[in-house]
Amino acid sequence: MAVRSYRIQAIHDRVITVAADNLVRGRQFNVYRNPGQQLNTRIGVLYPDIILTPTNSNNVQFIIEVETSDTVNASEALSQWKSYSNLGGIFYLLVPQASRILAENICRQHGIRARFGTYSIDSLNQLTINYE
């Protein structure tokens, strides 16, 4: 697990908050989040950034891991992504828009099954998240 600078960690945690808040609005899922170093909800011994279960079940349906530009790399792929992709739910990597192709290539190289979402922050500090 990478150690991020305060500024990058703040971006990471903001993306988790906004993504989770957007998912809660749909009310189809229970949304659990583990921002920063918080260990609020786990699957086995793992603590992905966001976990979604159907509102009437405890079965994990989606796992979302948020990465920043400095953590889209093979080390993170092998230390986290591979494990998360094998937990039983649909695994999403939420990465900066500019890191999307790199993340896909790393997953392909290491046999990691993932779907992708991207985020960007514009000059007005507006955060936009898109899922594929």
Image (cartoon, rainbow, N blue to C red):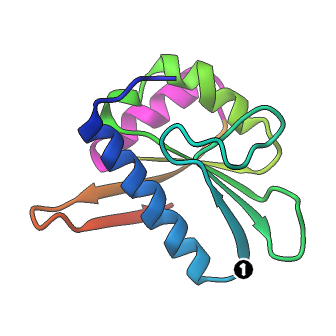
98 and 15: which one is in front?
15
Q: Position of residue 125 (x, y in %)?
A: 17, 63
* 10 horizontally vs 25: left or right: left
Farthest residue, direction left? 123
Query: What residue is shown at x 56% (from left), y 28% (from top)?
Result: 108
Q: What residue do we see at 47% from left, 55% from top?
A: 16
Asked whether, in this view, residue 52 is left or right of residue 100, the answer is right
Residue 96 visible: no
The magenta stretch spans residue 108: yes
Relative to 42, is 68 on the left or the right?
left
Left or right, residue 121 beside residue 117: left
Give the answer, above or below, for where 101 lies relative to 32.
above
User: Does residue 76 lie above or below 122 as drawn?
Assistant: above
Report the residue marked by disc 1: 28
Q: Quadrant of residue 48?
A: top right
Of helix, strand and loop, which mostly describes the magenta segment? helix
Q: Position of residue 47 (x, y in %)?
A: 67, 39
Eyeballing the image, is 79 above or below 93? above
Residue 50 visible to the viewer: yes
Residue 75: give x, y in percent of width and height: 50, 16
Q: Secondary structure at mark 1?
A: loop
Please state the horizontal and vertical placement of residue 107, each as a whole percent of the image. 55, 30
Q: Is residue 127 magenta?
A: no
What is the crowding at mark 1: few (fewer than 14 residues within 10 Å), some, or many (at least 20)? few
Q: Within the image, what quadrant is residue 15 found in?
A: bottom left
Q: Residue at x 46, y 29 (%)?
A: 105
Name which residue type carries label 1.
Gln
Bounds of the magenta span?
97-112
